[in-house]
Image (spheres, helix red, strand yellow):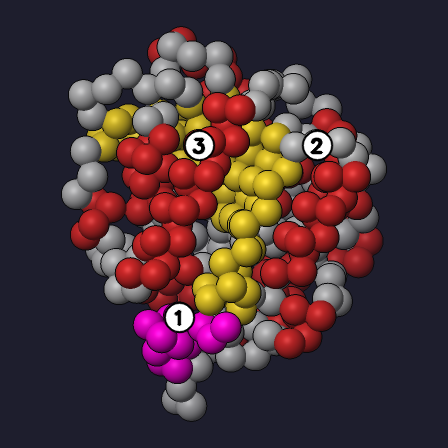
Amino acid sequence: MNVDPVLAGVLAKVHAPNATPMHEVSPERARAAYRRMTVGTRAVANALPVDGVDRMIDSPAGELHLRVYRPRDTEPGATCVFLHGGGYVIGDLDTHESISRTIAHEMNVVVVAVDYRLAPEHPFPAAYEDSLLALEWAWNARAELSGSSDLLLAGDSAGAALCLSLTTSTSAVPVRAQLLLCPYLDLVAATDSRRTFSQGHLLEEATLAWFANSYAGMADVDELATDPRVRPTSDPAHSRAPATLIAVAGFDPLHDEGVDLASRLDAAGVRVDLIELSDMIHGFPDFTDSSPRAAEALIQVIRAFDVLTKESESR
């Protein structure tokens, strides 16, 4: 199987000889470049009958910015907290608006997207603490949000790791099911897929190292990677996890981490479904307007998550 032709063109452009790798610029420039690539390029998702309203909630660090997406003219069946990816360094509510809107529309749920603090300005545990606060807020506000006690979690890349960290922790919030899309689960992994796709596949090994060091701050990355809030696969309490859908991309350095997690959850007795998207790259939801295949893959994943959610019970 070859990579989707449209995405192959994306890779050629991103890794052109005159292109500067993300890890060689400042976090501010990296965020701006990612926003240029994503914000305003989602005409299809932006046209969906979904309304988004910004909310600010109190937090120990100040105010936490959320965006609540509600499907129009329907009664939503659940609330889904969405945690965006970006290696804990880039990404925000706007860069991931497309996937939030698509989840709300396809699943008929209220989506609460979280603008957690980013590294290196706010290293670990800032992102985890903000995500936990948002999850607890969504649970306490469930009557206002959807009128349903069903609470879901979804995230891509680093956001997926935050999801798993929350659901395998001692959090008292009952989560019915979680979606982990191309999860970035290990700051120091040395898997076959990381070696095979270490260069030229959007998410490079040097960029992953930059993300890890930024998130660690002054801490040692190897030592920090033993903390289950950072490396949830190191937590033996996988049996706490709710029903889980894991989607992995065939040309993603993080592919093997997702596959390994599926095996771990299955061994722990957790309902886990694994979707292999053999022609996709990491971050493929960013290109759903230009790549029909990427759009199809995202819908496939979200609809499979909808099925899993309806077949599962809160843990």
Cα separation, mark 3 vs mark 1, equals: 25 Å
* Residue at (60, 36) in percent of width and height: 244
Q: Which residues are magenta?
A: 1-14
- Residue 22 at x, y = what percent? 48, 71
The residue carrying mark 3 is 306
* Residue at (73, 47) in percent of width and height: 263
The residue carrying mark 2 is 270
Q: Is residue 17 magenta?
A: no
* Residue at (36, 59) in percent of width and height: 294
Helix, strand, or loop for circle 2?
loop
- Residue 213 at x, y = what percent? 66, 61
Q: Which mark is residue 95?
A: none
Q: Which residue type does callout 1 highlight?
A: Asp
303 vs 257, nearest the viewer: 303
117 vs 68, nearest the viewer: 68
Helix, strand, or loop for circle 1?
loop
